[in-house]
Every structure is written in C-alpha cells, then in structure tokens.
Image (spheres, coloured by chain):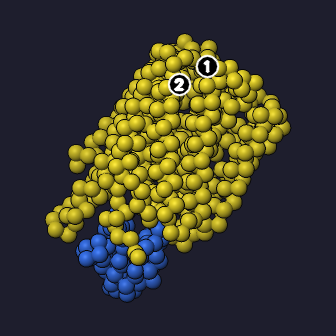
Chain colours: A yellow, B blue
C-alpha cells in the first residue's frame, strides 16, 4: 500500500516541544559558560560549572533538537510513521526533566548526579527504542538507514559509557580504564552520534534545499567504512594507549570526512537552484569546518601535539561543525514544519504565504557573523589564555544564540 | 505527461520531477502525484515563471499540474 501524507506526518506539537525546550537549554548553557572564565583560562575543563554547561549544551540543546528534528524528519525521509506518538510525548517529558535535573546536580552536587543521570538515560533509551521500532518498519532500508542506525548505536554507547563513568566515580570500579572510557564517551558522542546523524540527514536535505538531481550516491558507500572504521580504530587506541593507532584512526576519519565533502560538492554541482539560501550556505560552511578540524586533529596527532590541543579542537568541533550545522538546517526545517502544520489544508483555497516568507533569510546573516566571531574569540582565548577575549567572545556568542532563538520562535507567529 | 511519485523516499520525487521538467517542451504540462506538497520546488517554479496548481486527492496525496 502506498502510504498517504497524513499517515506519515508527526503531530507538530512533538517536534516543537523538543525545539522550544532545547532553546532554553541553549541559553542556560551559554550564560553559565560566561561565568566559567577562570577555569577555562586554566584549561580546567572538568569542573562542575563546565560539566553542567557542556551537558546542558549537548544533551539539553543539541540532543533534544536532534530528537525533535528526527521525530519530524524520519517519517518524511524514510516513509515510515513514528511508532507511537504518545510514547514520544512521555519520552520528551522524561528526557527534559532528566536533562535539566542532571545539569543542576552536576553543578551543585556532582556526587549525586547518578539518579538524574539515570532519568536522562531512561529518556534517551526510550527515544532509541522509539526510533528502533520506527525504522524496523521501513520497507526498503538504504545506505542512509545505516548512517542513522549507526548514529543511534553510537548514542547508546555514549550514554552507556557516561553512566559507567558516574558509577566508576562513586564505586571506584574500572578506575584503570576511566580515561579510556572518558575519551570513548567524547568521541562517540560527537564524531559517532552527531557526525553520523548529520551525514545521513545531509544526504536527504542538501539535494532538497539545493534542488539537485542526476548525481551519484556511490561515494556515500565509501564515506561510511572509512569514517566508522576510523571511530573503531580510535577507540581501540584509547584502551591500548597507542598513539600510532590513534593517528591511524584519525586518518581514516579524515579520509571519510573528505570523501563526504567531495560528495556534497558533486551534489551541489548538479543543482538547479543557483542562489542558495544564506542559512543553508551556513550549514554547508559548517561541513567545511568539520573537515578542517578533522585535518587539524590528524596533523596534530602526527606531530605529537594532539593531546595538548584536543580540548580546544573538541570545542571547535562542537561549535563550528555540529552546532552550526544544526543552526543552519533549523532555519530551513522550522519554517517548513510550521508551514505544513498551519497552511497545508489551505493551499488553493486562499492566498497563503510562501515558504520563504516564514523566516527572514537575510536577517540571519548578522546572527551567523556574531556566532562565528563570538566562538572564534572564545577559541582564541583558550589558546592565548586571555580572560577579556573570552568574555567578549562568549558574550557575543550568547547574544547571537538569543537572536537565533528569537528568529526561530518568530516563525510560529507567521 | 503524468508522473506518479507516491511511495518514493525524498529526495526522489523532487529529482524525478526536475528530470521530467528538463525534457518538457515549452508550453507543455507536467502532472505529478506526490505524497506531500513539494514545498521546496514551488519557489523554483515561481522563479522560472512556470504556472502550477495543487489539489488534494481523495487518498490524501497531491496532484500538481505544472505548465512550462
């Protein structure tokens, strides 16, 4: 049977619940970071304030937004309805409560963060279960199902390792492997979960936003083994403490990422839409940044200074690649979502606004400039150890985040 | 010319439509049946000056008639 549009469209309240709560987490995390300058200048990243801000940013913002976007995109992109929407709303509640409580305890009482950590874990597990039940119903799995599926497995491993660390901290178990687990947790959470997910959905969204056709999908089959293989090799290196293995793992990831960039450029060459939207161009720029950071990671590993720069590199990876991809795509996804919910039944009956009227694409430029300049200032301050540069950069970035949230919130008034 | 894009994963419906539009003679009409309204295509059609009309079908899919 051919699925109809209505059967494949998620109740809009579900993705929007995630998106709006994630905005609150974004603002809270950035404001909290603003007050952590003393620790950041000393390269002390593992302190309560930064733990809390990092988890608010990654779990509260990026993960919640990825969940909300997936509730909307999976049914559309993979032609399969969400397994159970009511379960989705419960999952939203559990994850939101868990994440904010977790961030609160990490800040005030890290020793007792295990219980809110477990609530967050349950929320994420519920999401994984929901996606597993949804994707297994997909009639024809494709290479992109593999990307999204792998991303979900990486997410599961990331939280599993995170909980292991909390348990280890409390009980002293597996103390010898604590750093290997910690590094694997960071790698799988960033390059595993987010990168694989952005790769998978970029293959759907880049052709849609650029109106491309007649391109080959073969390189996608090459990106996967290189990148996923690179992740595996890097994790082995953490446990064997072998720098050569780590360098090799980073090289494989770099090759995978480079092929991905090449593939996206092939898709863009075949586009019909000549002038790309600014927000979409921003997301494309993020892809280039991701590639450059992978290059920097490999070169620094090769020259033996990787361990010295891994903190700032990871931070840049989070912002320049992951956050900027999400922000760029969100400028396109949210208007599409809202338009579909509000005007889909009215087309042909009366004049309805065009998709481009839903968000001011031109007004996004100063927001993107402030985000880039702000985070560049923050990264620079970490390298040179200047508190003034940090506060200026972080303040600019926080203001830009607010403007971004405002632009997204304004869409629902159209 | 009628193109049935139902049951295809995005971006397939859009790619098939663009392919068909390329070979459509000026003044010709292409009818497509999609599970969803081709939101991102509309802007391009407007930009190119192609006329288009969308109507919902009984099964919940959409018929879009595009005149080049």
Is there one chain holding both mark 1 and mark 2?
Answer: yes
Name above or below for residue A396 compared with residue A352.
Answer: above
- Residue A66: tell me if it is visible: no
Q: Residue at x 40, y 82 (%)?
A: B3
Q: Residue A30's spot in the image, x, y percent?
A: 44, 26
Tell me, for residue A114, which label it has, or none.
Answer: 2
Q: Residue at x 41, y 57 (%)?
A: A82
Name above or below for residue B14 compared with residue A41.
Answer: below
Residue underneath mark 1: A170
Name above or below for residue A239 compared with residue A169.
Answer: below
Q: Residue at x 39, y 54 (%)?
A: A84
Q: Residue A99's spot in the image, x, y percent?
A: 44, 31
Mark 1 and mark 2 residues within 8 Å of each other at the beta carbon: yes
Toward which corner of the image does residue A18 lie, by quadrant? Answer: top left
Q: Does label 1 or label 2 sit earlier along the sequence?
A: 2
- SS for dot 2: helix
């Amino acid at each position: 049977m051919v699925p109809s549009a209505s059967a494949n469209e998620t109740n809009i309240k579900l993705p929007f619940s995630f998106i709006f709560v994630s905005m609150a987490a974004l603002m809270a995390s950035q404001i909290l970071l603003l007050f952590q300058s003393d620790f950041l200048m000393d390269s002390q990243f593992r302190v309560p304030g930064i733990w809390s801000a990092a988890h608010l940013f990654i779990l509260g913002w990026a993960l919640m937004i990825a969940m909300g976007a997936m509730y909307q995109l999976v049914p559309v992109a993979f032609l399969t309805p969400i397994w159970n929407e009511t379960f989705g709303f419960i999952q939203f509640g559990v994850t939101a409560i868990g994440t904010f409580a977790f961030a609160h305890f990490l800040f005030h009482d890290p020793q007792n963060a295990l219980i809110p950590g477990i609530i967050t874990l349950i929320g994420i597990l519920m999401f994984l279960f929901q996606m597993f039940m949804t994707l297994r119903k997909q009639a024809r799995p494709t290479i992109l199902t593999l990307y999204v599926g792998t991303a979900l497995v990486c997410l599961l491993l990331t939280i599993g390792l995170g909980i292991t660390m909390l348990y280890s901290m409390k009980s002293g178990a597996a103390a010898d492997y604590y750093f290997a687990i910690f590094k694997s947790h960071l790698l799988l959470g960033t390059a595993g979960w987010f990168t694989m997910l952005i790769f998978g959905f970029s293959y759907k969204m880049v052709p849609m936003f650029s109106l491309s056709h007649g391109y080959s999908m073969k390189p996608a089959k090459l990106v996967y083994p290189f990148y996923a293989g690179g992740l595996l090799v890097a994790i082995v290196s953490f446990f064997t403490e072998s720098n050569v293995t780590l360098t090799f793992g980073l090289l494989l990831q770099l090759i995978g990422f480079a092929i991905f960039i090449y593939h996206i450029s092939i898709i863009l060459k075949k586009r019909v839409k000549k002038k790309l939207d600014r927000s979409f161009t921003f997301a494309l720029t993020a892809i280039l940044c991701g590639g450059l950071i992978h290059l920097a990671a490999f070169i620094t590993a090769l020259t033996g200074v990787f361990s010295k720069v891994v903190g700032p590199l990871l931070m840049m990876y989070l912002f320049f690649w992951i956050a900027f991809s999400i922000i760029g795509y969100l400028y396109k996804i949210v208007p599409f979502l809202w338009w579909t919910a509000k005007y889909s039944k009215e087309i042909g009956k009366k004049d309805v606004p065009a998709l481009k009227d839903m968000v001011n694409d031109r007004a996004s430029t100063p927001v993107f400039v402030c985000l880039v300049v702000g985070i560049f200032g923050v990264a620079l301050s970490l390298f040179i150890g200047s508190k003034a540069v940090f506060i200026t950069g972080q303040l600019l970035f926080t203001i830009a985040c607010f403007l971004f949230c405002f632009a997204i919130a304004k869409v629902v008034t159209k | 010319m009628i193109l049935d894009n139902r049951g295809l994963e995005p971006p397939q419906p859009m790619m098939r439509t663009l392919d068909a539009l390329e070979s459509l003679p000026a003044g010709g009409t292409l009818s497509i049946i999609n599970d969803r309204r081709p939101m991102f295509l509309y802007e391009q059609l407007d930009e190119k000056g192609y006329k288009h009309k969308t109507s919902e079908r009984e099964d919940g899919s959409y018929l879009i008639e595009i005149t080049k």
